[in-house]
Amino acid sequence: MDHTTKSRPGYLSSVLRNKCPRCRQGDLFQSTHPYKLSTVLKMNETCPVCGQPTEIEKGFYYGTGYVSYALSVALSVSTFVAWWVIIGFSLHDSRFFWWMGINAVFLLAFQPLLMRLSRSIWISWFVRFDTDWKQSAQISGQTGMASS
């Protein structure tokens, strides 16, 4: 077994932690706190570690609306199933309306996290992980930060 192999950070872990998809080390967002609403979607222009641009082209993140919608539907289905299993539904009382209200609160509470996660997922679909990103950056003339 070769002990000199590089450790490869996991895809799911890097997406959930909002890390750069190229090096899986640098932060995508300027602030690590998702509930600081004034900076919730402010991203670094480039990855602070490998220099990967975060906005590949103008309007790149318009597609995140679809990802955010899918995540919101998944959260709603999860709360629906949990409510059905734990509390149950009935046509003779207002349990369904209670679920709708609590689900709406969950969606509002998790919206900053869902927006960030959708951006992280979206860019990870278009930028591949590169184990040799340091060598690629040196060849192209970048050293840590992308040149403008």
Image (cartoon, grey):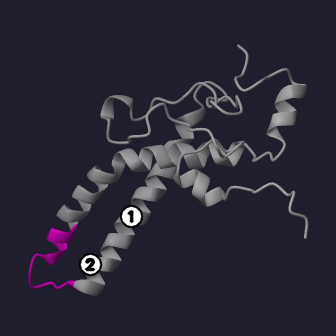
- In front here: 12 or 110? 12
Picture coordinates of residue 136 (x, y %)? 86, 33
Identify which residue is drawn at 75% across, 46% down: 128
Picture coordinates of residue 142 (x, y %)? 79, 22
Disc 2: which residue: 83
Vertical relation: 99 (above or below) 105: below
Identify which residue is drawn at 38% across, 40% down: 33
Picture coordinates of residue 116 (x, y %)? 46, 44
Give the SS element for disc 2: helix
Vertical relation: 57 (above or below) 64: above
State the separation of the CA atoms marked 2 and 1.
Answer: 12 Å
Vertical relation: 14 (above or below) 99: above
- In front here: 109 or 88? 109
- Asked whether the viewer can see residue 66, the reply is no
Disc 1: which residue: 75
- Residue positioned most to the left: 93
- Was residue 96 drawn as part of the magenta stretch in this picture? yes
- Residue positioned most to the front: 3
* Residue interval drawn in magenta: 87-99
